[in-house]
Image (cartoon, grey):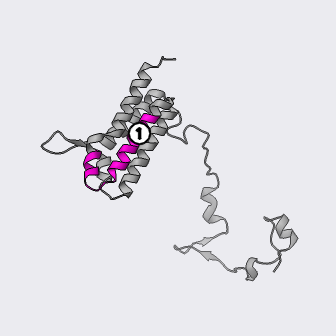
Amino acid sequence: MAMPEDDIFSPHATRSRPPFGGTQARGKVIDQDGRELSDAAPFQQFEGFQFDFRNATANPFGNLTREQRLERLEMIAKLLDVAFIVPGTNVRYGIDGLIGLIPVIGDIITTAISLWLVREARLLGAPWHITARMLANVAVDGVVGMVPVAGDAFDVMFRANVRNVRMLRRWLDKQPRL
């Protein structure tokens, strides 16, 4: 069944025949409450709704200063590596150690978050040698973390994210302020 040319060139015009060879629906459309709906009624509430990703209010992280970005990275690193304390001891652990208890998938998730931290450091202007050291820390944490029990203990003790943010902070402190 071929489509008439007027349907191809003017898609919003009324069609000469119903699509897919069916018949057009006739009668009223009633919602669950028994009210009659017009054809456009379900979508009228979304008529003026639009996304504007160029505007700063659309992206909550769009207009952060360098210090705010660094504070955010420090907060995430602490949450991942040292957020909690084992009761009765001084041993600190974070979400990285908890998520890492899920075999393979947990280590992949925490490695992905750590790689995001490295990406943010790169966006802050970290040079290649700092980024390379950060990637090495993430790689060691990810690979050794895959080992079932010893890897989880290593995750708790190694704290790759805190190391990486500390390394980034030291490098940024040496840079001249503009």
Q: Mark 1, residues whose alpha carbon is within 10 Å: few (<14), some, or many (≥20)? A: some
Q: In terms of secondary structure, what is the magenta stretch mainly? A: helix
- Residue found at x 42% / y 36%: 134
- Residue found at x 25% / y 54%: 149
Of 145 and 33, the residue lying toward us: 145
Of 28 and 80, the residue lying toward us: 80
Q: Is residue 22 above or below residue 61?
A: below
Assess whether residue 137 is covered by the magenta stretch.
yes
Residue where numbered disc 1 is placed: 136
Left or right? Give the position of 55 relative to 151.
Answer: right
Q: On the rendered image, what quadrant is the N terminus found in?
A: bottom right
Left or right? Give the position of 28 relative to 94.
Answer: right
Q: Is residue 65 above or below residue 158?
A: above
Magenta residues span: 132-155
Q: Position of residue 12 (x, y in %)?
A: 78, 64
Assess whether residue 80 is covered by the magenta stretch.
no
Q: Work out whether residue 82 can be spotted.
A: no
